[in-house]
Image: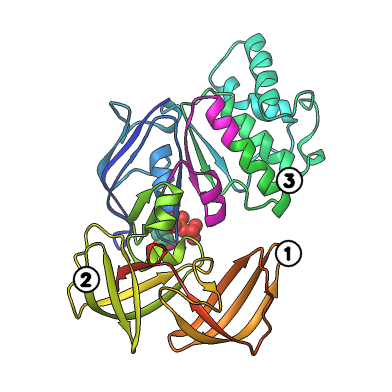
Amino acid sequence: MEAIRIEGVTKVFGGTVTALDGLDLEIRAGELFFLLGGSGCGKTTLLRCIAGLETPTSGRIYFGDNDVTEMAPHKREAAMVFQSYALWPHLTVGQNIAFGLEERKVPKKEIKERVAAALEMVQLAGYGERSIDQMSGGQQQRVSLARALVVKPRCLLLDEPLSNLDAQLRVEMRREIRRIVKENGLTGIYVTHDQEEALAMADRMAVLSWGKIGQVGTPEEVYRSPLDSYVAGFIGETNLIVGKVLQIDGATCLVDAGGTILNGRVTSPGWQPAVGDEATVSIRPEVWRLHKDGGDNEISGKITERSYLGQRIEYFVETKVGSQQVVEMNPHVIHEPGDEVLLHAKIGDVVVLRK
Ligand code: ATP
């Protein structure tokens, strides 16, 4: 188990592309940590710097107290799992897993035992003699996990490991990967585009933007208290409404959005709103309520679209502040497109952010 510390890491490719920009990050020993962010924000580059497959242009990387910035990848005790599995098609399952141990000149008897143990860990005991092309996509991803685990790494680096699997298998493998990381006391760093995967699996996560950290926190912190509208829009669905600060009242803030007054919490400790500042109000679809009685942040609107999704219904409601996405769980009343409704949202669930 190993804590990982990234200090001021910058990576510039070809003298012009800054993939990482003075990035600081601390990943705790034994946590499953997610790196998220839009395409090209530097997630894979950061993972590759941690693995030793790229060298930072400047800055340092520490595993525990050891500075590993210049250390060769195989000496770091970090194993990587790729989206493409990167398995050898002409070798059997067992030979694929044994490969790294043979390179390290581990005795034959020990290799046999460790391959069997790794196969058991990923629930593929007895599959060692099979050829890779006889394995399904999900099984191949388990083999690549076993191959990473067999070298007894202290950290496991996962680059979109589930994106080639179908939806059902992805959900099953989420639990598996979390179990493997926790049972083996590994520090896991996981890159994904899939924010639902991150919310479901992560102990903590970082949202990256242009090679910098946008926010670090637990899934709940990042979802409920985003620091800016980029993070709010990136993690989960949200309705973003732009306006001007009208009044500040302790930790809550009134925003005038073109004549509609909205009230919510300020979640960014780095932002002290002043009257007249531009602000963005973030209201999650499940935070909007559709009740005749109304409540805080009340707005009238007309339903334009409805999707019935079993235990929840998703609506789009046209209002003075734009079209609002609304999700109702276990609804008692089902509205029809064209219905006039009143939307409202509790002040504590509405977030006011710097524009
Ligand atoms: P994605 O989600 O699309 O995989 P990412 O967040 O993983 O993106 P990176 O692959 O880390 O992003 O890329 C960050 C930036 O660095 C991009 O602008 C990319 O084009 C650039 N980049 C990455 N690798 C190289 C390379 N070897 N040479 C030149 N530029 C590179």
Q: Position of residue 106 (x, y in %)?
A: 57, 14
**Residue 137: mark:** 3
> Whole-Å distance between the Cαs marked 2 and 1?
40 Å
Closer to the camera: disc 2 or disc 3?
2
Outermost residue toward the front in this view: 293
In primary-sequence order, the first of circles 2 and 1 is 2
- Residue type, mark 3 in image: Gly
In the image, 317: left or right of 141? left
Q: How packed is label 1: few (under 14 Cα within 10 Å), some, or many (20 or more)?
A: few
- Describe the element under mark 2 as helix, strand or loop: strand
User: In front: 269, or 15?
Assistant: 269
Which residue is disc 2 drawn over?
A: 248
Question: Where in the figure is residue 245, as x and y percent of width and height?
Answer: 24, 77
As for residue 262 lying within the magenta part, the answer is no
User: Alpha carbon of mark 1 to alpha carbon of mark 3: how far?
Assistant: 30 Å
Is residue 137 shown left or right of residue 339?
Answer: right
Q: Is residue 38 left or right of residue 68?
A: right
Compared to residue 71, the image places residue 231 above or below, namely: below
Q: Quadrant of the N terminus?
A: top left
Q: In the rendered view, would you say 31 is above or below 266?
A: above
Local crowd size for mark 3, using a 10 Å CA cut-off: few (<14), some (14–19), many (≥20): some
Q: Is residue 24 above or below residue 72?
A: below
Residue 347 picture location, percent across and down: 38, 67
